[in-house]
């Protein structure tokens, strides 16, 4: 059981007929129950990569397998796959088109065979889970603020109850409370429903706080793929490709340089707080 | 005279449904007053739906007040005859880099604004050249915008506004879609234009670290102004910020957490350097 990419290239031609690799020899396996963060500079291939996970984009070379079956073999049920692997895209406004917010979120489940009544129950729950309020459900998606649109788009995929929930920059444009709500929702889905979560993020702090495994893309290739601690230990390489390590890791480095000795491997606020308190308690 | 004055501004969105009874009103801006001096760099914070974008759109006349008024260099935005002049003086950059580019070549895109103003051709090219130089994109002047990164597109959008030689630029979450490097580039450009060219900046953002660049912060809540002060003033009120559903910069948050545990750190800490400095006093 997994999504597996084998030697995947995705090649496109630009105006001058030059061949460009959006993905180059990508080999990855996503196992059920994982919580994964994907990072990389703009144009590094993150969005192209995730669209290969449910067959929205087809590799130029190489293969994609779902539960061991090649998804481009004739008898493969691609439509069914899209129900199991849900992707929420970067620009939510491109995904909203129905008359009311509730209709919009009902669309997915109904498209996959639920009745209107069943769909409404699922949709309402999904909308409340992403922090929308009851009185907003009958509004038009076009009357929403930027952050509200983003939440509705996430609810739309959530309502399909996917096995693999993939989100491209889910927290862009969300306020701090909204960001926490969405990330904690993902954590809860991962823990209680055993949903596999993959999210693309530019925030190293968010990645560090939530995921186990981190994949770093660079010019279409997988630069790092592994445990987040291991990946964040490559500070110099990450900076070279336009990324960074979490704020707290820089803080630990500065403290150490000034003789305030804490572990270098600090990734989150909680870890930083504990480490600093430990030093101070010893002093007293 | 203030470059920008917002007086008792109220904005209500009216949505009409299928019938008259479906008609609904949303008060997005609820009686606010702001006055901005030339050369200020203001960050606007607030929860989703608190009215930030609605406010931004009033400043260059994309939205009209339901009540109250907005004056740009003394010009009332409600007077149609002022609109061209107002838009030349106050340009707006939005979040999505893909929706703002109109030209098929970078130069053309930047020239679009001045062309629309009916400027003489020679002047237009002078302005385009210096605007592209100003945003550090001269090398791309003949490129197709489609092939640029998000951060580069935002710089082009800013160049398009710079070519109008405005006194004020409004940026509505200009970095939300950018990677860390693109974000740094756009922010350093915004800061430089403010410092060197004295362009007044109003920037909406959800990133507390970015806010530290500003001289002044306005916090919105439910269409009203909840706080207005310097970054140090605003971020020292951690509890209040949390109540408004907002955060403070990482260093301020960690200092707050440590204060809760009895570590005597000052409330004015907002940067990593300040936090490290104070912590090192203890060892
Ligand atoms: N075109 C519209 N029609 C009706 N209501 C709208 C419209 N645009 C915004 N609103 C409503 O007005 C309020 C303020 O929205 P606004 O877009 O100004 O918020 P914001 O602070 O920019 O939020 P965000 O951080 O999510 O971008 C919200 O309640 C929103 O639902
Ligand atoms: Mg907005």
Image: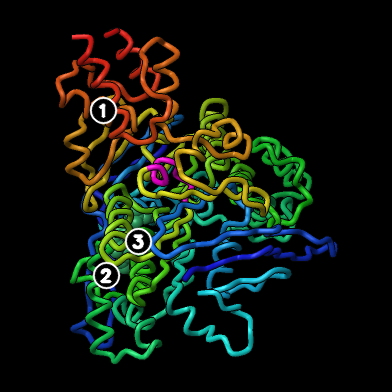
Q: Which residue is mark 3?
A: A145
Determine if the magenta segment contains residue A205. Answer: yes
Q: Residues within 10 Å of mark 2 (few under 14, many from 20)?
A: many
> Residue at left 49%, top 38%?
A230
Q: Nearer the viewer, mark 1 or mark 3?
A: 1
Where's residue A118, x and y in %? 25, 87
Would you say the beta carbon of the disc 3 residue lies within 8 angstroms of ligand 1? yes
Specify whether residue A3 is in view: yes
Contact between labelled residues 2 and 3, with CB atoms less than 8 Å apart? no
**Distance Cα–Cα, label 3 vs label 2:** 15 Å
Tell which subunit mark 1 falls on: A
Nearer the observer, disc 1 or disc 2? 1
The picture places residue B189, in percent across and down from the top left corner, at: 57, 35
The chain carrying label 3 is: A
Which comes sooner in the sequence, label 1 or label 2?
A: 2
- Residue at figure coordinates x 78%, y 45% from the top left: B122
Q: Which mark is residue A274?
A: 1
Looking at the image, tell me whether mark 3 or mark 2 is earlier in sequence order: 2
Disc 1 and disc 3: Cα gap in Å?
A: 38 Å
Circle on res. A127: 2
């Amino acid at each position: 059981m997994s999504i597996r990419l084998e030697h995947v290239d995705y090649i496109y031609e630009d105006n001058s007929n030059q061949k460009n690799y959006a993905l180059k020899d990508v080999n990855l396996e996503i196992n059920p129950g994982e919580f994964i963060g994907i990072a990389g500079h703009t144009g590094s291939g993150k969005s192209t990569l995730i669209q290969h996970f449910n067959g929205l984009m087809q590799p130029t070379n190489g293969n994609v397998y779902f539960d061991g079956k090649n998804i481009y073999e004739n008898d493969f049920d691609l439509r069914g796959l899209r129900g199991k692997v849900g992707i929420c895209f970067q620009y939510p406004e491109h995904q909203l088109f129905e008359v009311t917010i509730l209709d919009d979120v009902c669309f997915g489940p109904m498209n996959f065979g639920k009745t209107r009544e069943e769909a409404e129950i699922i949709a309402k729950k999904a909308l409340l889970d992403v922090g929308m309020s009851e009185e907003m459900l009958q509004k038009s998606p076009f009357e929403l603020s930027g952050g509200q649109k983003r939440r509705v788009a996430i609810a739309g995929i959530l309502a399909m109850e996917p096995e693999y929930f993939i989100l491209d920059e889910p927290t862009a444009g969300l306020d701090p409370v909204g960001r926490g709500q969405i990330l904690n929702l993902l954590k809860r889905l991962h823990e209680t429903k055993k949903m596999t979560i993959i999210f693309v993020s530019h925030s190293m702090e968010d990645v560090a706080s939530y995921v186990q495994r981190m994949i770093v893309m660079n010019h279409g290739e997988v630069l790092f793929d592994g445990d987040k601690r291991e990946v964040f230990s490559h500070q110099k390489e990450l900076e070279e490709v336009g990324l960074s390590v979490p704020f707290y890791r820089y803080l630990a480095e500065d403290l150490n340089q000034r003789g305030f000795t804490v572990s270098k491997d600090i990734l989150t606020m909680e870890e930083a707080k504990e480490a600093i308190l430990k030093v101070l308690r010893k002093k007293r | 005279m203030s470059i920008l004055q917002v007086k008792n501004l109220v904005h209500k969105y009216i949505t009409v449904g299928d019938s008259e009874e479906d008609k609904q009103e949303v008060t997005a801006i609820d009686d606010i007053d702001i006055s901005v001096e030339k050369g200020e760099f203001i960050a606007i914070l607030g929860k989703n739906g608190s009215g930030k974008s609605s406010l931004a759109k009033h400043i260059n006349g994309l939205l009209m007040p339901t009540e109250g008024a907005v004056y740009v260099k003394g010009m009332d935005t409600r007077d149609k005859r002022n609109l061209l002049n107002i838009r030349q003086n106050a340009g707006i950059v939005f979040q999505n880099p893909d929706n703002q580019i109109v030209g098929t070549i970078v130069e053309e895109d930047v020239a679009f604004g001045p062309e629309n103003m009916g400027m003489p051709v020679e002047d237009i090219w002078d302005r385009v050249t210096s605007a592209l130089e100003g945003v550090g994109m001269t090398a791309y002047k003949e490129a197709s915008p489609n092939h640029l990164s998000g951060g580069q597109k935002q710089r082009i959008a800013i160049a398009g506004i710079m070519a109008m030689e405005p006194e004020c630029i409004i940026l509505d979450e200009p970095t939300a879609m950018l990677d860390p490097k693109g974000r740094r580039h756009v922010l350093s450009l915004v800061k430089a234009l403010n410092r060197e060219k004295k362009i007044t900046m109003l920037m909406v953002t959800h990133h507390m670290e970015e806010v530290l660049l500003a001289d002044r912060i306005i916090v919105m809540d439910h269409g009203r102004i909840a706080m207005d002060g310097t970054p140090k003033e605003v971020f020292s009120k951690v509890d209040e910020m949390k109540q408004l559903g907002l955060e403070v910069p990482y260093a301020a948050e960690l200092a707050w957490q440590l204060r809760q545990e009895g570590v005597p750190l000052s409330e004015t800490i907002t940067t990593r350097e300040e936090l490290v400095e104070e912590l090192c006093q203890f060892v």
